[in-house]
Each structure stands twice: as structure tokens, then as C-alpha cells.
Image: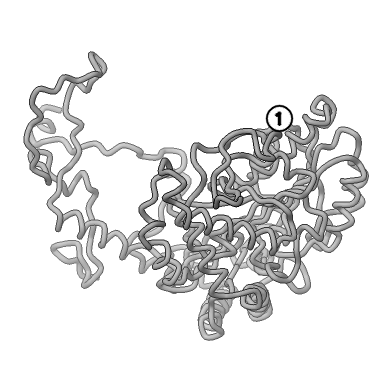
């Protein structure tokens, strides 16, 4: 292939590192030197310049626009990550989140000036409680794992209130659980006892009952689970754990598969976090902002954290102390209440869909996943037989004799213009490929995706190993030596030596 003098290839523009592109001798902003200012850092101040590169405004804008063109996004095509639910974020939600009074709030404003925002949070609370069949919800958790921590801290507070903290020390966690589940249990001071699964990908109810005892504090179950399957015995699990004196924590990561169809409160759940970015379309990824409200049962509602939004005859206000029905709260998880932008987006999504529309969200998500499952089963091996819920799970059994691995297959998907599915998770399935199309993809979009994967599968079985070993060939950056990158990461940019310095060496 002919190389260009610039490194650019048509509209695929090369982007050097900021440190390579910027200038250290000038500043992109002209500011007068501060006069009469004495540093309060004393001898802790910087001894020399930070040496950050400077840019003009056009340079900075072009740099980041060019970077964005090298990345994949849900606005470009299907994002089939299983378990992470990357779906279209309606622009209506974004417009609402930018309204004055929502976008420019300050957490220390007097509540008399934030009544509209507090009313919105309160209404969102009502929707979440109604959809889950739970009497209370904590809105302050900032993400799914944070909401998970909130639920387990409420469980711990309830155990302490009973004086059982010395005896109830064990939490049961299925082997297919998200990694945050056992980590959260351990963070709260519990020991973790793994639950085995059955041949059909669900919790072994008999093994669960055999592990119950007076030392069990709780069980943590994802439903639908990480294999994309509904736990058919969930009510029996809950009843058994409650009979043993424990609590039922449900990981609500996959609530989008059952919203409007089944209420966790009716299934015996005591606590469940809800990823607003997964079920209710608020933006996901990029390090935040997130939101993970946690719904609580009657048994755990008294221990909900503060702050909390309540309504009385004088309007809406924020409970900031152990009063007004929050005397048993387990404390404060964050300094302020929550992510206002996420609350606005989530409620906008709910109001624009209505109860019937949210029910259809779950129905279409499950329909799309099963459509993908059936189509790909022509060439690929299902992780577990039978229908799935919101995501379709495949193993690498069909690749075993081809010399092509799950990673190779995923890299080849990039050449086809698709972001790869979730790979090697859940760990209970060999070479797992977990695909979640969500409800926002059309049949035409799913057919294009499935046709491409089926074509790749046939190529792998036909012995075209080179196509996979070299992939991705058409991406701005080719395949990395991932082992070396993981073991010998280069985390610091070092300026190249000058001609004089190289000569001296």
C-alpha cells in the first residue's frame, strides 16, 4: 500500500500524541502575571514548570475531533456488548438535561430555589418504587457497584440492629456473578461462599439450601443472570434465605429485560440497585457520570442512607440528618445527593415511554436477543440450550478445531465495522461471547450484524486463519501484542533525545 507523506489516508487523519503536537515554549491563553500574590504552599510548591503542551483553540479542537473519528460509538452502529447494555440515548433526554434549573444547579443552593429539581427527583423515586414493587429507594449511589454497596450496607445495618453482626458473617454468591458482587460483600466485612450453577446456567437451588444456616447474612443473585437467563427458582431462593434469617440482594444490572413485566419486590427481593444507564438510557461509559439508585424492602427501608428527598406541606426538602424517619440510616455515602443530569434523562425516558412503552422495552430487548441467538446458532454454539432473555451467550466450542480463538474472532469483527461483543465473560462458559442487541436495534441492523458474524464463522471453519490472525487490518491502529502491553505498559511519555544528546550517548 502506498504511504502518504503526512501519515493521513484520505479522511482518516493521523493524530500524534498531545505531547508531540503541542508547544512547550508558548501558551494557548495569554494571562497577565499575578502581582502581590504569595503562595501558601511554602516549600511544597513546584520547583519547575509542569511542562504541559500548549495549543491554540483550533489545534485543540482538531486534535479531539480526530480522536473521536477513530473511536466507535452507539451513534455509528450496533454496540453488542453483553451485560453492559449500550443502547441509543434519545436526544430528547439530552435536551431536557440541559434545561436551566437542571444543568446549572449547585449542591449548596437553598432548597427554596431548587423545588423543581427536588420534585423531579421525588417523582423519579415514585416511578422506581412503582416499577420494582419496593417501598423505598436511595437515590445517592453514583453507579451500579455503588448501588450494590448501598444495598449491602443496608443489609449490614439491619443485621447490626438485630445484634447479629458477630454471627451472620457469610454471603452466598453464584459462580456466574459479576465480579463486583463478591468484592462488595467482602468490602462490607462478610465472607463469600460460592454457589454452583446447574447444567442449564442457573443457580443450583439444592446447593443453595444446603449452604443455608444461622451464619448466612444474605444472598446476592443477578436476575436475569449473567448468562442471559431468568432464574426460575428466584421466589423459592428468597423464601429459603428469609426462612434462614438472611436477606436477598438482587443485582439489578439486567432490569431492562424485565421492566414492566416482573417486579423484584414480588419476587422476594430486599435490595436491588438499578443502573439508570442500562434500563433507562442515560449515557454509559467514559468514566461517568453514572447513577445507581437502590430500591429497598420494608425490612431495609429504615436503614436507607441520607441525604433523601421528602415532601411535606411546605414543599420538597432534603433530609440531611438522622431525623424525620431516618433515625436508623446507615450514614452518608456521598457528600451530595446524586447525578441530577442522570435523573433528568431517566425520568424523560420513563415519561416519553409510559408504562406500556417500558413494558415493550423489555419485550423488544428479549425478542431481539432471541432473534440473534437463533440466527447465529446456525454456525455458533450456544452457551446454554433454549431461549434467553436480553442477551445471547455463545461458547467457543464451534471454534475448537479451527485454530481461531474468541479474541481472533472479535478482532475480525472490527474489520467488518462492528464493536466486538463481550468476550470471555461469564467465566463459566468456555471462550464466552456475550451479545446484547438491546431493544433499540431494528431487524435490518440485526440482520447486517448476524450476516457478518455468520460470514466470519464460515471463514473460520473454512480454514482462513490469516484473516483472523492479522485482524484488525482496516482499523486506524492494528492489533497490539496484548501480552506485552499488559506486562510492560508504557505509562509515561518520554521526549525524544535531541541530536546532541544522541551523539553524546
Circle 1 residues within 10 Å: few <14, some 14–19, many ≥20: some
374 is higher (above) or lower (below) than 330: below
Q: Whole-percent x and y of residue 205?
A: 89, 53
Using the rendered view, name the quadrant where residue 91 is placed. bottom left
Residue drawn at x 66%, y 61% as measured from the top left: 254
Left or right placement of residue 38 versus residue 222 in this view:
left
Query: Foreground residue, 91 or 454?
Result: 91
Q: Residue furthest bottom?
A: 444
Residue 333 appears in the rendering: yes
Q: Whole-percent x and y of residue 284?
A: 49, 58
Query: Foreground residue, 156 or 28?
Result: 156
Residue drawn at x 81%, y 60% as measured from the top left: 266
Query: Foreground residue, 294 or 489?
Result: 294
Residue drawn at x 45%, y 73% as measured from the top left: 77
- Give the residue at mark 1: 189
Residue 422 appears in the rendering: no
Number of callouts? 1
Using the rendered view, name the quadrant where residue 389 is placed. bottom right
Q: Whole-percent x and y of residue 191?
A: 76, 32
Q: Residue furthest top?
A: 43
Residue drawn at x 89%, y 41% as measured from the top left: 211
Left or right placement of residue 339 versus residue 360 in this view:
left
Name the secondary structure under disc 1: loop
Amino acid at each position: 500500500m502506498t504511504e502518504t507523506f503526512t501519515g493521513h489516508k484520505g479522511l482518516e487523519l493521523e493524530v500524534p500524541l498531545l505531547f508531540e503536537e503541542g508547544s512547550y515554549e508558548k501558551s494557548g491563553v495569554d494571562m497577565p502575571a499575578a502581582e502581590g500574590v504569595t503562595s501558601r504552599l511554602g516549600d511544597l510548591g513546584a520547583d519547575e514548570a509542569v511542562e504541559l503542551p500548549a495549543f491554540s483553540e483550533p489545534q485543540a479542537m482538531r486534535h479531539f475531533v480526530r480522536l473521536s473519528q477513530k473511536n466507535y460509538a452507539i451513534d455509528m452502529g450496533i454496540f453488542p456488548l453483553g451485560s453492559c447494555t449500550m443502547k441509543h440515548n434519545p436526544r430528547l433526554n439530552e435536551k431536557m438535561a440541559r434545561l436551566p434549573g437542571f444543568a446549572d444547579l449547585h449542591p449548596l443552593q437553598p432548597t427554596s430555589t431548587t423545588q423543581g429539581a427536588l420534585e423531579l427527583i421525588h417523582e423519579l423515586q415514585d416511578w422506581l418504587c412503582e416499577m420494582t414493587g419496593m417501598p423505598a429507594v436511595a437515590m445517592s449511589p453514583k453507579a451500579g457497584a455503588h448501588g450494590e454497596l448501598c444495598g449491602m450496607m443496608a443489609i449490614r445495618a439491619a443485621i447490626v440492629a438485630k445484634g447479629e453482626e458477630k454471627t451472620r458473617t457469610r454471603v452466598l454468591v453464584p459462580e456466574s456473578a459479576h465480579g463486583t458482587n463478591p468484592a462488595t460483600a467482602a468490602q462490607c466485612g462478610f465472607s463469600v461462599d460460592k454457589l454452583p450453577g446447574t447444567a442449564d446456567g442457573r443457580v443450583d437451588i439444592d446447593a443453595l439450601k444446603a449452604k443455608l444456616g444461622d451464619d448466612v447474612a444474605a444472598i446476592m443473585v443477578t436476575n436475569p443472570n449473567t448468562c442471559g437467563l431468568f432464574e426460575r427458582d428466584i421466589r423459592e431462593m428468597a423464601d429459603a434465605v428469609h426462612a434462614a434469617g438472611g436477606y436477598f440482594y438482587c443485582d439489578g444490572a439486567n432490569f431492562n429485560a424485565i421492566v414492566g413485566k416482573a417486579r423484584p419486590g414480588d419476587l422476594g427481593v430486599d435490595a436491588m440497585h438499578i443502573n439508570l444507564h442500562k434500563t433507562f438510557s442515560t449515557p454509559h461509559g467514559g468514566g461517568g457520570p453514572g447513577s445507581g439508585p437502590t430500591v429497598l424492602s420494608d425490612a431495609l427501608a429504615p436503614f436507607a442512607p441520607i441525604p433523601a428527598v421528602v415532601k411535606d406541606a411546605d414543599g420538597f426538602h432534603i433530609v440531611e440528618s438522622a431525623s424525620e424517619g431516618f433515625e436508623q440510616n446507615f450514614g452518608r455515602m456521598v457528600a451530595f445527593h446524586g447525578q441530577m443530569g442522570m435523573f433528568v434523562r431517566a425520568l424523560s425516558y420513563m415519561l416519553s415511554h409510559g408504562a406500556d412503552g417500558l413494558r415493550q422495552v423489555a419485550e423488544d430487548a428479549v425478542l431481539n436477543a432471541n432473534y440473534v441467538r437463533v440466527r447465529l446458532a446456525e454456525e455458533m454454539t450456544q452457551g446454554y440450550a433454549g431461549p434467553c432473555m436480553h442477551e445471547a451467550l455463545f461458547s467457543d466450542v464451534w471454534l475448537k478445531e479451527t485454530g481461531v480463538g474468541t479474541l481472533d474472532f472479535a478482532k475480525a469483527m472490527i474489520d467488518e465495522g462492528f464493536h466486538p461483543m463481550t468476550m470471555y465473560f461469564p467465566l463459566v462458559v468456555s471462550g464466552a461471547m456475550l451479545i446484547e442487541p438491546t431493544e433499540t436495534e431494528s431487524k435490518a441492523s440485526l440482520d447486517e450484524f448476524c450476516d457478518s458474524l455468520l460470514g466470519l464463522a464460515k471463514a473460520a471453519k473454512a480454514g482462513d486463519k490469516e484473516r483472523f490472525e492479522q485482524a484488525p487490518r482496516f482499523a486506524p491502529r492494528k492489533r497490539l501484542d496484548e501480552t506485552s502491553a499488559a506486562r510492560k505498559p508504557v505509562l509515561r511519555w518520554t521526549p525524544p533525545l535531541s541530536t546532541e544528546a544522541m551523539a553524546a550517548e
